[in-house]
Image (tube, rainbow, N blue to C red):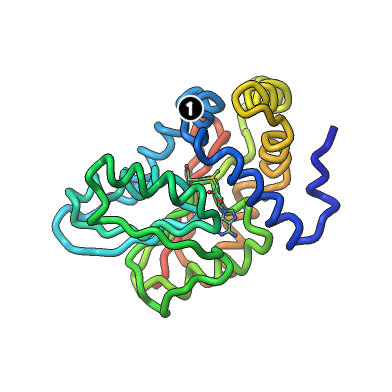
């Protein structure tokens, strides 16, 4: 069965994505651990290691599709609380969970939560030293617009980092991954949230996302330079990097 994301308009796609994350917001963090076997933590830690946040300078990062704050909190902590992170998400339910977590972690002074669309960022040109997005860009209907906005709000010298599911490039692992994603993920989704469709959507959106080299080309088209990527876990996820020079 297909959730039918292929056949719907961009506006309809975004509203279905929004429904999914409104429904799962409170259980999102638990689901992430279950579905990735905890791997998303390792990948996010590697993302922050590649960003190598300054521990001395005061600087600003924008974490788009930041959801419940995972990436932003890691950056603030890795910077010894010198970074200020703006968590932007289109979904108020996800942000509400993120704000609670920031309070509980004592990180509220270093974080800010903004409800907005990645395709239309409510910030002036050249506002941030870094732009991060993790497992978010494939949900955005017009990826090219999101990339152009990323370029616009970065300061010259600013860094773009995108972590996303990608093309598995190891034989055998690709078969295991197919079995896992087409069977296990929707079933875990159903067991925990009572809703398999949401997770069927997740699997479909991963299949449709451009592979590593093609996505790198899109990032270059938005104006970024020195675009490179690293595969994690055989390409289940990939981290793309670019610079606004
Ligand atoms: N970055 C977080 C993480 O890695 O745990 C959350 C990722 S979650 C899989 C995807 C997020 O993208 C959701 O919180 C969803 O609301 C958000 N999102 C979807 N479409 C968006 C858009 N057009 N603009 C901003 N955020 C969007």
- Disc 1: CA contacts within 10 A as few (<14), some (14-19) or many (>=20): few
Residue 23 percent location from the top left of the image? 61, 41
Residue under the point 71% across and 30% down: 196
- Direction left: furthest residue: 56
Residue under the point 50% across and 22% down: 37
Quarter of the figure with the N terminus: top right
Circle count: 1
Residue under the point 51% across and 49% down: 93
Residue 118 percent location from the top left of the image? 54, 63
Residue 133 percent location from the top left of the image? 48, 53
The answer to whether residue 180 of the structure is visible from this angle is no
Mark 1: secondary structure: helix
**Horizontal relation, residue 104 to residue 55: left or right:** right
User: Which of the 4 image quarters holds residue 220?
Assistant: bottom right
Quarter of the figure with the C terminus: bottom left
Query: Vertically, is 111 above or below 174?
Result: below
Q: Which residue is mark 1?
A: 33
Residue under the point 74% across and 35% down: 197
**Horizontal relation, residue 155 to residue 165: left or right:** left
């Amino acid at each position: 069965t297909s959730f039918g994301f292929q056949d719907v308009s961009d506006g309809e796609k975004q509203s279905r994505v929004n429904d999914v994350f409104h429904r799962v917001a409170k259980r999102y963090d638990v689901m992430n651990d279950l579905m990735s076997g905890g791997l998303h933590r390792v990948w996010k830690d590697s993302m922050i290691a590649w960003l190598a946040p300054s521990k001395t300078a005061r600087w600003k990062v924008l974490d788009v599709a930041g959801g419940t704050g995972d990436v932003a909190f890691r950056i603030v902590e890795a910077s010894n609380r010198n970074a200020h992170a703006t968590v932007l998400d289109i979904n108020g339910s996800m942000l509400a969970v993120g704000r609670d977590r920031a309070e509980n972690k004592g990180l509220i002074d270093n974080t800010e939560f903004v409800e907005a669309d990645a395709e239309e960022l409510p910030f002036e040109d050249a506002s941030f030293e870094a732009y991060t997005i993790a497992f978010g860009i494939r949900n955005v209907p017009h990826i090219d617009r999101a990339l152009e906005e990323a370029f616009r709000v970065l300061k010259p010298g600013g860094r773009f980092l995108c972590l996303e599911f990608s093309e598995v490039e190891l034989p055998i692992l690709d078969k295991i991954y197919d079995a896992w994603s087409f069977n296990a993920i929707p079933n875990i989704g159903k067991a925990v949230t009572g809703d398999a469709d949401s997770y069927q959507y997740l699997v479909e959106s991963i299949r449709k996302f451009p592979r590593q080299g093609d996505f790198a080309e899109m990032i270059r088209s938005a104006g970024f330079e020195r675009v490179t990527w690293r595969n994690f876990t055989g390409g289940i996820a990939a981290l793309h990097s670019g610079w606004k020079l």
